[in-house]
Amino acid sequence: MHRATRSYRSDLARVRGLGSAKEGAREWWMTRLTSAALVPLTVWFVVSIVGLVGADHAAVVAWLGSPVAAGIMILFIVVTFHHTQSGLKVVIEDYVHVEWLKIGAIVLVTFASIVLALAAIIAVLVIAFGD
Amino acid sequence: MPTQDRPLSPHLQIYQPQLTWTMSISHRLTGIALAVGTLLLVYWLIAAAQGPEAFATAQALVGSWIGRLLLFGWTIALFYHLANGIRHLVWDTGLWLDLPSVYASGRGVLIATALLTIVTWIAGYWFRGGA
């Protein structure tokens, strides 16, 4: 069993040979969509936080007590963690080549993003509707 | 799989640092830094939801010298990732892809990052009452 011609293609690549799963466009598009959304949201976030430098608890409660501020904050959280998850996923896919480690890291990043986003949203809702 | 006898392309340390590729990897690195930074945002929101005492602790932590140093780093990362992200969105439309434009927009991103960071921190100290 010898090869007549030397090829640099791996056995796996030769066997698969089918190209991509053809579902990448949506991921690519979602990253762009969240990027575009994060431009105004990030500006709003930075301006809001600068206005809260050194603020006490009452000031923050008053700020997020406004439905507009709480709404934009929740939107900022959702889009931020969506973007974070998709960005970290690409980084992992590019640099982690041990299959189980790659899948494990992507699962971890996805779960962590969802849990953190949920925790932040609940915190905003407690501040907005609590007391 | 006989992947080990494939030819390897030259690795990072062999290349002269250029604005193009250093800014590209910086986009990823700032993205990863900002992903870590979301942990502070979630902690800060949860502390605010818990009440005045927990929030005072969070504010003291953020206001400490190490807290400010981290925030300063995250401010740079945020504005860099924002400005360079807009540069990427422009590229996605097919514009600014020639080399002179790539260098010009790259310098523009660096200048914008510096200016926005400085303005934000001056504004932050201003709102705090010039402390």
Image (cartoon, coloured by chain):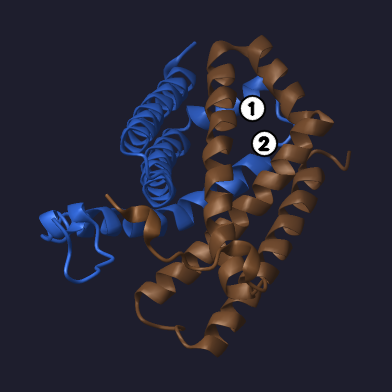
Chain colours: A blue, B brown
* Residue B69: % across, % down: 78, 39
Q: Quadrant of residue B40?
A: top right
As helix, strand or loop, the secondary structure at mark 1 comes to helix
10 Å crowding of disc 2: few (<14), some (14-19), many (20+): some
Amino acid under disc 2: Leu
Q: Residues within 10 Å of mark 1 (few under 14, many from 20)?
A: few
Instruction: Return the mark for residue B128.
Output: none
User: In this rendering, would A45 be left or right of A121?
Assistant: right
- Pinpoint residue A99: horizontal percent, then vertical percent: 31, 38
Residue B50 visible, this orientation: yes
Choose between B57 and A100: the one closer to the eye: A100
The subunit carrying tag 1 is A
Q: Splitting the image into 4 quarters, where does residue A25 fall?
A: bottom left
Q: Tell me residue B7's x, y (percent).
A: 42, 66
Q: Is residue A24 above or below residue B110?
A: above
Q: Is residue A74 left or right of residue A99?
A: right
Q: Quadrant of the N terminus of chain A?
A: bottom left
CA–CA distance in space, label 2 to label 1:
8 Å
The image quarter containing residue B94 is bottom left
Q: Which mark is residue A52?
A: 2
Query: What residue is rendered at 36% in x and 39% in y?
Result: A98
Tag 2's secondary structure? loop
Q: Nearer the viewer, residue B8 or B25?
A: B8
Residues marked 2 and 1 touching at CB (< 8 Å): yes
Would you say A32 lies left or right of A58 here? left
Q: Which residue is mark 1?
A: A59
